[in-house]
Image: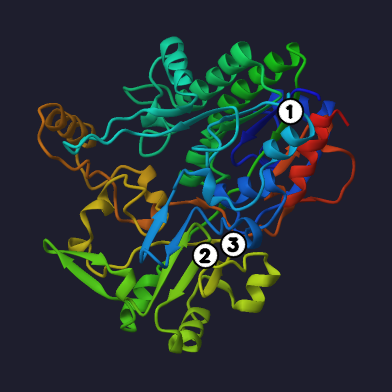
Amino acid sequence: MKRTVVLNVVGLTEGLLGEHTPALTAFRRAGSLRHIDPAFPAVTCTAQSNYLTGRTPAEHGIVANGWYHRELAEVQFWKQSNHVVRAPKIWDDLKAVDPQFTCAKTFWWYNMYSTADWSVTPRPMYPADGRKVFDIYTWPYDLRVGLKGDLGEFPFFGFWGPAAGVDSPQGKADVTSGWIAASAKWIEEHHSPTLQLVYLPHLDYNLQRFGPDDPRVTRDLAEIDAIAGDLIAFFGKRGARVIVLSEYGIVPVKRPVHLNRVFREKGWLTIKDELGLELLDAGNSRAFAVADHQAAHIYLNDRTLLNAVRSEIEKTPGVARVLDADGKREFGIDHERAGDLVVLAEEDAWFTYYYWLDDRLAPDFARCVDIHRKPGYDPVELFLDPAIAFPKLRIAWRLLQKKLGFRMLMDVIPLDASLVKGSHGVRPADRRHWPVLLGPAAGAGEEPLRSTEVYGVIRSAVAGA
């Protein structure tokens, strides 16, 4: 088998390659570029699952980054157990061919309790006193000790939130992808896996903040090009084949769509008062939306509302299409975890999870980076609230409160969805905004790869084809 490294440069598209990405452009010219017809929805967890199983959500079950668990009556996002992916993985298939095959998953998702030989993923610790201590989870456990001993603490602050992708007192804009790249080198030097999957998220942040056409993104392109170029050279010298790919392309957006507010005005949501603030009670709501970028799953606890809900959604500005049972089969997302209806946004729109009608009654977590409590994805977590006169002072005060042992909220996130200028989830009209696969392993041809065909490209590369 041929040792292979897959660099997942999140958000990379043909339209972003050029003068600001000399290393990636040279890598493309030395091999080839294939567009990837994006997964649906074109989001991290679904795309990665398509790539690593060769199957669609109808089979592996990853219908989004999060969904409504009907038996628990809870919306849960960003779970990490590999067991939720209900299909064989590429490392299992290759190990069945050659028992000597090994695999390292370096920050790809669903990284806990997989059968990969080495795994590294972000994972805070939650002591009983209410603290949240940033850390990583690894398998084997001693991998964590070695990585942190040689590389220092994982810069969790730069992985998501207002400090991600920007220079801050805590570190440089590209510090997180730089740390991940260093960990990939460390794993290679200590273990030399047959296949290593490396996640590089740096482009994701400012492409969503500013949109792909903003000139400020050129700095991000240069930074990720330097990181990826260094890895290409490093692994090339060690005799490993390199594949560069992305999960989705980010397009400019200008219209946030608040489906849950539409449903609330129709009387279909149930809202619970908790300490004077409003909490969505999904289990008691007749219909509600779980938003994830440009796709939303609509769950009905009262199925007599199906036609009424569909009619209301279809006349909502920013909605491109509503998938019923036949539509879900067409898009390969007909799985029990999917919503009763699945909604696609128009290309310049995206879906929020917002359900409150008065910002004064928004739940406390709405103004925090809190990816697990929010019943939907929230890209507004990338921003500091512009209404805060001295945000750095607010942050310093909150950190001091935390250090002194007081309970506190890092309540610095705005509630203005119009700040977001880039999103993803549906297939862009222009292929220059589609995800790509670069390198000699991409093969020749003008026809795009289906997202499920990426599995075969990786497997063929490892097989030495």
Residue 225 coordinates in the image, percent (x, y): 63, 26
Q: Is residue 83 left or right of residue 280?
A: right
Q: CA distance from mark 3 to mark 1?
A: 45 Å
Mark closest to the chain's N terminus, 1 or 2: 1
Residue position marked by numbered label 1 in the rendering? 99
- Name the one closer to the observer, 349 or 325: 325
Residue drawn at 35 percent across, 50 percent down: 372
Q: Is residue 308 left or right of residue 102?
A: left
Q: Residues within 10 Å of mark 2 (few under 14, many from 20)?
A: many
Residue position marked by numbered label 2 in the rendering? 337
Residue 259 coordinates in the image, percent (x, y): 41, 71
Q: Is residue 157 left or right of residue 45?
A: left
Residue drawn at 66 percent across, 50 percent down: 50
Q: Residues within 10 Å of mark 3 (few under 14, many from 20)?
A: many
Residue drawn at 49 percent across, 46 percent down: 208
Q: Secondary structure at mark 2?
A: loop
| Disc 3 versus disc 1: nearer the observer | 1
The answer to whether residue 366 shows anywhere in this view is yes
What kind of residue is marked 2? Arg
